[in-house]
Amino acid sequence: MADYTPNEMMTVAAARALRNEDVCFVGIGMPSAAANLARLTHAPDIVLIYESGTLGTKPTVLPLSIGDGELCETALTTVPVPEMFRYWLQGGRITVGFLGGAQIDKFANLNTTVVGAYDKPKVRLPGGGGAPEIATSCGEIFIIMAQSKRAFVPKLDFVTSLGHGEDGQTRARLGVKTKGPTRLMTDLAVFQPEPGSNEMIVASIHPGVTREQVSEATGWPVRFAANVTETLAPTAKELETLRDLHARTRRAHGEAA
Amino acid sequence: MSRVLSLAEAVEQHVRDGDTVAMEGFTHLIPHAAAHEVIRQGRKRLTLVRMTPDLIYDQMIGMGCAEKAVFSWGGNPGVGSLHRFRDAVENGWPHPLAIEEHSHAAMANAYDAGAAGLPCAVLRGYVGADLPKVNSNIRSIVCPFTGEKLAAVPAIRPDVGIVHAQKADRAGNVMLEGIVGVQKEVVLASKRSIVTVEEIVDEFGQRSPNAVILPAWTIGCVVKVPGGAYPSYAFGYYKRDNAFYKAWDAIAKDRDGFRAWMKANVLDQGPEVFAAHARKMLQAAE
């Protein structure tokens, strides 16, 4: 079995969730690595969209920001930002939105705004950016986040973007027709919403990880699906492609020094 | 008709203490040189509007130019926090900073409404999110045709809009390409505007009939500042200096280090340094 890091396992698991026919709204960082890994492996025709307005972009290195030149130069076309949010996102043309966050709760609501009180924050985080509307306008939402008790919390300090709401039923109550978070990929496991309750429960555990480790790293009493499986370890091709992508990216960003 | 001015003249004539100023450029064409001039001229009590405050507002906030920020994502993209912005919000240094926080979709729509002369923007936004609880400028409106409840935010109508673009021609028309962001909207939404450009050409020459052009009569003034978007980038001219964005994290981390950097690189310099910065990042070097 190939040697790999928990982070690589997380990225690979996230990439696999994407389908060749998806139109994906990509966030910067880990979502971007996963989306491009999918494009370079099993989903060559996937359409990647970044909120800077680039439609159908095929970057050869991962962008540091949401609007690196690389994204625009390799895109099918680049549209103005108001058009991006109105025609493409709000217009319902995106099948998957890929998000990360600083805090998540068991209904996959996300906080990227503040830790502590909004008016007197302990930590002021960057804020929502595109996430509040990505969360409700995309057909479904995939989330990628490394697990820890600080990040996987019983109650969010601030709801930046809606998951399944405070009781798992909020989307229906508010008339939101999209699915919301359907998968959460972590460095330990893959979560999916339990049918009915919409609580995120563990669907598969990564190789070598125990249930105790997953529980330890979750700030709520985590539940496991009846038929929990073991996540398929990264294949040699997946690892090689991901490492090449990161190496190219490091070279490109280093060159600029 | 737009006038060609020096950067110092443009800022002197267009930016006043207490103004609402929007400097836009969505990761691309960020008007850094113009911001440095505003800092050098010591403008105060500004309301700074920008979707992604970024390094440009981190510098202005840290130098005490701002009393309020209107924004939708306040980080150093791909790197982490804006330390000066956080220090102002969390500790009131160098003085307290009021914030009005939106989502990207709302701000993009609000610029568009400003350009369109509408009082507000309407979007299907903020559903189930907490921002409307802390920002009284996020309200709702009911569609008179379907009864759907939609979010409404006020149009953005800055006193001054400042953007960077690739080219102006002799007549003062401006052309930009690449990630065009909300550049056009912010100029059309603003009462006054400054457009800094990489170069001024006799005429634009061959171009798509749909090229993004701001006609001279929509622009306050044009200023030639080669490299004026550095460390962001100008498509077709130079690349983003990602290494500098990473280095900024350490520079901005503590107050003294930040001030020393600003003195050496902004207060004691002029706009001409940008051409040299950009030369480092020439796309030809690829």
Image: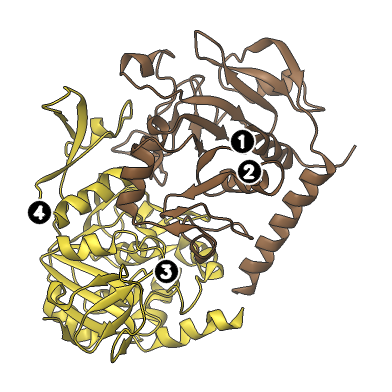
Chain colours: A brown, B yellow
- What residue is shown with label 2? A34
How many C-alpha atoms fall within 10 Å of the one at disc 4: few (<14), some, or many (≥20)?
some
How many C-alpha atoms fall within 10 Å of the one at disc 3: few (<14), some, or many (≥20)?
some
Q: CA distance from mark 4 to mark 3?
A: 40 Å
Labels 1 and 4 touching (C-beta < 8 A): no
Question: Which corner quadrant of the image does residue B269 belong to?
Answer: bottom left
Foreground tag (3 vs 2): 2
- What residue is shown with label 4? B117
Q: Secondary structure at mark 3?
A: helix
| B125 left or right of B216 in image | right
Labels 3 and 2 touching (C-beta < 8 A): no
Labels 2 and 1 touching (C-beta < 8 A): yes
Nearer to the camera, B269 or B260 = B269
Position of the N terminus of chain A, as image quadrant, is: top right
Which of pointers 4 and 3 lies earlier in the amino acid sequence?
4
Q: CA distance from mark 1 to mark 3?
A: 43 Å
Q: Secondary structure at mark 4?
A: loop
Q: Chain of mark 1?
A: A
Question: How far from the left and from the top, in percent, is residue A188?
Answer: 70, 29
Question: How far from the left and from the top, in percent, is residue B247?
Answer: 54, 67
Question: Which corner quadrant of the image does residue B32 belong to?
Answer: bottom left
